[in-house]
Image (cartoon, grey):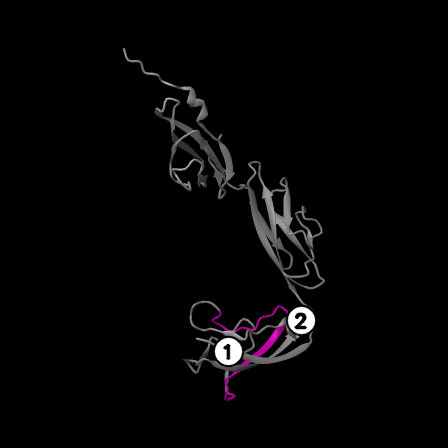
Amino acid sequence: KDTTIVDFDNLSGVSINPSTSVCIGNSTQLSASGGITYTWSPAAGLSSTSISNPIANPAVTTTYSVLVTYATAHNDTCSQMLTTTVHVYTPSSFPLTATTNKDTISQGQSTIIHAITDTTLTVQWSPATGLSNSNSFNPTASPTVTTTYTVTITDSSGCPKKAFVTIYVISMKCNPDDVFVPNTFTPNGDGKNDILYVRSNSVSEIYFAVYNRWGEMVFETNDIHTGWDGIYKGELANPDVFAWYLTAKCYNGDEMKKKGNVTLIR
């Protein structure tokens, strides 16, 4: 008479991590053990379906199953199906907006920033530098440089929600070093360094002109947001070294003058 021995002892050695929770957009690591091979499903949101510890990043709450194949003490091959659930929470349903009384200030000045949300929540501003109170709904902001402040609220599920506001700080000094004109630009249409701009947060008015080697003016503007695209008289200017001249009026009323060269590269 033949006898078949079925060994269930190894079942206790097959395991899976308990269910877990994440905020939407975050990930968690699943973990099964005790097997020779692992087959996870569904595949959506998993870094791999055939390893013991895939990373799960589901968009919605998902129950993952893993078929674990293992060997018994008698070298029999058995399989066991295990499951675990990743609960996905969305950020707070409370509205959140960050605003400011003034988005542009001079160095040494202040403004008030506001977190507009449910007042039963706790708010946290960062960075705390330049703020009168980083946990206030309406702190006074006195940044010394242009700063983007982030306000965060957290709901009962532990998921944060963020909003942002930028305070631009204008230097009251009239320092030529605070006005920058690149020494090269590449107007080749690739979207990178295609336009020659005057760059500064310290001036209120400018006059900017560019000349070729024969002294012909190829470009001029009074608008700091307007730059030269490398076109002269409707045609692409040849690669060359051009001279530029700049006069600027600072926010404190002082004026400055600068000049230099720029190389056009195609």
Q: Secondary structure at mark 1?
A: strand
Residue 198 in the magenta stretch? The answer is yes
Q: Which residue is mark 1?
A: 263
Q: Is residue 9 magenta?
A: no
In the image, residue 143 lies at what x, y percent?
A: 68, 58
- 57 vs 208, left or right, is left
Q: Which mark is residue 108?
A: none
* CA separation in Å, label 1 and label 2: 30 Å
At 67% from the left and 67% from the top, the residue drawn is 171
Magenta segment's dominant SS is: loop
Q: Residues within 10 Å of mark 2 (few under 14, many from 20)?
A: some
Residue at numbered disc 2: 251
Compared to residue 42, the image places residue 135 above or below, namely below
State which region is magenta.
Answer: 193-215
Q: Amino acid at mark 2?
A: Tyr
- Residue 94 x %, y %: 56, 42
